[in-house]
Amino acid sequence: MPKRLSPLELMTKLISFPTVSRDTNLPLIDWVEDYLNSHGITAHRYYHPDQPKAALFAHVGPWEEGAVVLSGHTDVVPVDGQPWDTDPFTVVEKDGRYYGRGTCDMKGFDAIAIWAMVEAQARGLKRPLQLALSFDEEIGCTGAPPMIEAMQPVLPKGSAVIVGEPSMMKAVTGHKGGQGYSVHVRGFEVHSSLLPSGVSAILEAGRILEWVNATNAEIQTAEPTPVAAMFVPPFTTLHVGNIQGGTARNITAKDCRLDFETRVVPGEDSEAWKQRFVDHVREVEARMQSVRPETGIDLEPLFDVPGLRPEEDGEAEAMVRAITGDNAAHVVSYGTEAGQFQDAGYSAVVCGPGDIEQAHQPNEFIEIAQFNAGVDFMGRLLSRL
C-alpha cells in the first residue's frame, strides 16, 4: 500500500514547489494528482487557456450530490526583495512556528485538505467530500470561476464549500468584493510653455484622483448599512495603488498609467460602482479630446471578485460552527474565492488555520498550534461525514 503522508509532510512537499502566480503550477499539480491516484482517487484538471497552469478537483465517497467542498489555491505571492531569514520554499520549524512561503496563505490548508481526501478514501464516507485547488487567486481570483464551471459536468455538485483562507479557524461569513482596472491615460506632448495646446496625461489622471478622493469622502459621511457596519472600515473604498507617467519637467506628459480598485461591501451593487468610475473616466476623456481628438483613456479590467454575503441558515456556516463551537460574527475586508462559489449556487464560508496578518510577509509563518487546530477540525469534519 502507498504511504499516507502526514499533513506536515504534505505541506512540506507543497511548499517546495515555487508556485508564484507569474510561473507555472504544473509540477505541483502533477505531484498532487499522482499522490491522489496512488490512493485510488481520480483527479481532474482544468487548464489555463494560455499559460502552463491548471486547477485540480476530485471527489471521494458516494457518487451523489451534496458534497462538502474543500477549496484552496495553489499560487503564492513573490518573495522578490523580501528579507527572508530562511529558504522561503523549505518549511522550517522554529519557536512554535512553521516558516515558509504559503504556510499561512494557503498551502497549510491545502495540505490538510489533501490529507483529508486520502483519509476519507481509506475510512469510507456516507456523505461525499471534494477537493478544489485553483490557480491565480493571488492576482485577482481569476482561476476559480472557470474551475467551478469545469467541475459541474464532471463531479456531482457539492452543496457546502469551506474556503480555507487563514481565519484563525473562525467562521467568516462575509467579505467585501473587489474590482480593478489598469488605466492608461494617453495625452499629447507639447512644450510646457504651450500647455493649453497640449494634453497632459498626468494632469488629466489627476482629475481621476480628485474624483476618487471626493467619492471616498462622500461615502464616509454616509450612515453605514447594518451589513457595512460589520466591516472595518464600515464602507466601500476606492483606491489607486500606483501611478507612473511623464518624461521631463517641461513636456506635457504623453502617458500616465495607474491601477484603480474598489472594495465593495456585500449587498451593494458592484456593477453600479464600476459604472460610476467608467462614467467619470469618459467625462475626463471627452474633455481631453475636445483639445486633441487623438488622446484618450484605455481601461483594462484586472479582476472582478464578488463579495461573500452572509447567508440565512447557511449550511456551510452551520457545519463549521458545529465543529469549532465558534458562534461569533466574523467578516473581513479582503476578498476570497468564497463569493465565487456562492454565486455558482454553493453555500460558502471561509475557515482556515493561520492569521491573515502573516500572509504575503517576509518570513511568513503559521503557528504550529493553528496548523494542528486545522488538522483537528478536518478530523472532526471527516467523522461527521
Image: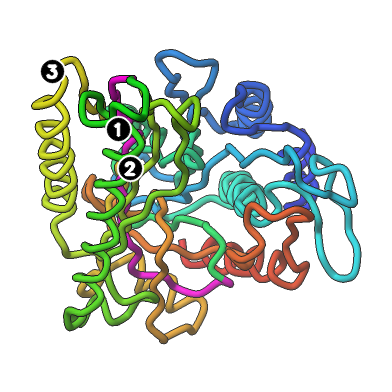
Which comes sooner in the sequence, label 2 or label 3?
A: 2
How many numbered discs?
Answer: 3
125 or 369: which is nearer to us? 369
Q: Position of residue 18 (x, y in %)?
A: 72, 32
Q: Is residue 164 left or right of residue 111?
A: left
Rounded to the nearest angstrom, the CA distance separating label 1 from label 2 is 6 Å
Q: Are marks 2 and 3 in contact (CB under 8 Å)?
A: no
Residue 306 visible from this viewpoint: yes
Q: What residue is rendered at 21% in x and 49% in y?
A: 345
Give the residue number, with chain letter if any, for mark 1. Answer: 301
Rounded to the nearest angstrom, the CA distance separating label 3 from label 1 is 24 Å
Give the residue number, with chain letter if any, for mark 2. Answer: 180
Q: What residue is rendered at 42% in x and 23% in y?
A: 46
Which comes sooner in the sequence, label 1 or label 2?
A: 2
Crowding at mark 3 (Cα within 10 Å: few <14, some 14-19, many 20+): few
Extent of the magenta region: 168-189
Q: Amino acid at mark 2?
A: Gly
Secondary structure under tag 1 reads: strand
283 or 147: which is nearer to us? 283
Q: Main secondary structure of the magenta part?
A: strand
Q: Are marks 1 and 2 in contact (CB under 8 Å)?
A: yes
Give the residue number, with chain letter if any, for mark 3. Answer: 293
Q: Position of residue 21 (x, y in %)?
A: 57, 32
Instruction: Give the foreground label among 2 and 3.
Output: 3
Q: Amino acid at mark 3?
A: Pro
Which quadrant is the N terminus positioned in? top right
Q: Quadrant of residue 352?
A: bottom right
